[in-house]
Image (cartoon, rainbow, N blue to C red):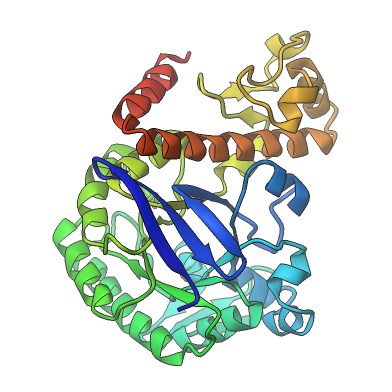
Amino acid sequence: MSISFTLHATDGAARAGTLHTPHGAVPTPAFMPVGTQATVKGLTPEMVRAAGAHIILGNTYHLALRPGDEIVRDLGGLHKFMHWDGPVLTDSGGFQVFSLAGQVKLTDHGAKFKSHIDGAPLELTPERAVEIQQNLGSDIAMVLDECPPADADPAKMRAAVARSVGWAERCKAHHTRPDQAQFAIVQGGLDLQLRAECARDLVAMDFPGYALGGFSVGEAPEAMHAALPACAACLPAHKPRYLMGVGRPQDLLAGVASGIDMFDCVMPTRNGRNALAFTSDGPIRLRNAKHRRDPAPVASDCACYCCANYSRAYLHHLFAADEMLGPTLLSLHNIAFYLRLMADARAAVTEGRFAAFHAGRLARWNAAP
């Protein structure tokens, strides 16, 4: 097997472990910065590594369209192509079935897209999703799944689960790369019985790891938080558990409290590009005029390159002047904040104080203006 998972400590349902991959070890719980198109937007790999990242994420659909998975393969694989020597996880393109629903024709055979770039056709079957990811050479490849919206009616939700299970079986049968692990994806929305049935069928196939998909797709955060403990409990305790596309800092801690090991989300970089900084005392909007003369760093408890060297006043100026350094610095800070949050959560689990840590963080965020 190309990966393995070691569980070191538990505190309630929360877990601290290590994910071992061909490109290095990943302490968990772990946040994966999103590098959809073989880049974490605005940041060099050295910046991402210095911020504390051990693993990053790329996207099958986008990389297959541009530059093309065969080009990446011929240039030495995704790690060499993007100059990142750590582990990489690639999504399967299943989320694009949800996010580009107006451009997708979906059948049991696969998903037919029109490229968002030029309208050219792209058919993504389970087999093609596997081939693309094998060409990319990621350490972890996700199976192709159907991700229905939160408000899908029960019949459509059940059909999506059945299709996802069938596609997972086809992905597993088609996969041949020994240095790459496949993770299966549990769907089912907020229907816990359907989630349990989906998990049962996928666990029987014995994948090296399992993900929970179909969250943060329109449901209330409180509903997701309520569903996570039961969903995580359906997954094997000795294998890594991944909550896809989630989310806000409080969502990550709710996931850790439920027994989740891995997370990814575009929020740190997307918000950083739009002048919003995450901090231990809540979000800060650097475009606000009150920061124009503020000599303080974004966060006094942060030692990232941005906070160690630049003031809120300078960042306010960069965004007012539309200088590209502003989004870079704030994206770097936000990534560092998310990674430090996971490192602090890991320490709290290891020391048996996660519940107090979780409650303390929520109290500070809830008290923020």
The x and y percentages for residue 227 are 23, 48
Q: Is residue 312 above or below residue 45?
A: above
The quarter in which the N terminus is drawn is bottom left
Q: Nearer the viewer, residue 337 or 287?
A: 337
Residue 119 seen by the camera = no
Q: Is residue 41 left or right of residue 254?
A: right
Q: Position of residue 297 (x, y in %)?
A: 71, 18
Left or right of 73, for residue 238: left
Residue lying at 27% horizontally and 72% vertically, measured from the top left: 161
Residue at left offset 37%, top offset 26%:
357
Q: Is residue 26 above or below residue 59?
A: above
In the image, 260 versus 213, the foreground residue is 260
Query: Is residue 262 in view from this perspective?
Result: yes
Q: x, y percentage for residue 152?
A: 28, 60
Residue at the spot 68% in from the left edge and 39% down from the top edge: 331
Residue 115 spot, x, y in % from top left: 63, 74
How many marks on residues?
0
Q: Is residue 185 above or below residue 175?
A: above
On the rendered structure, is 39 left or right of 183?
Answer: right
Asked where in the image residue 306 lies, by quadrant, the reply is: top right
Eyeballing the image, is 84 above or below 174?
above
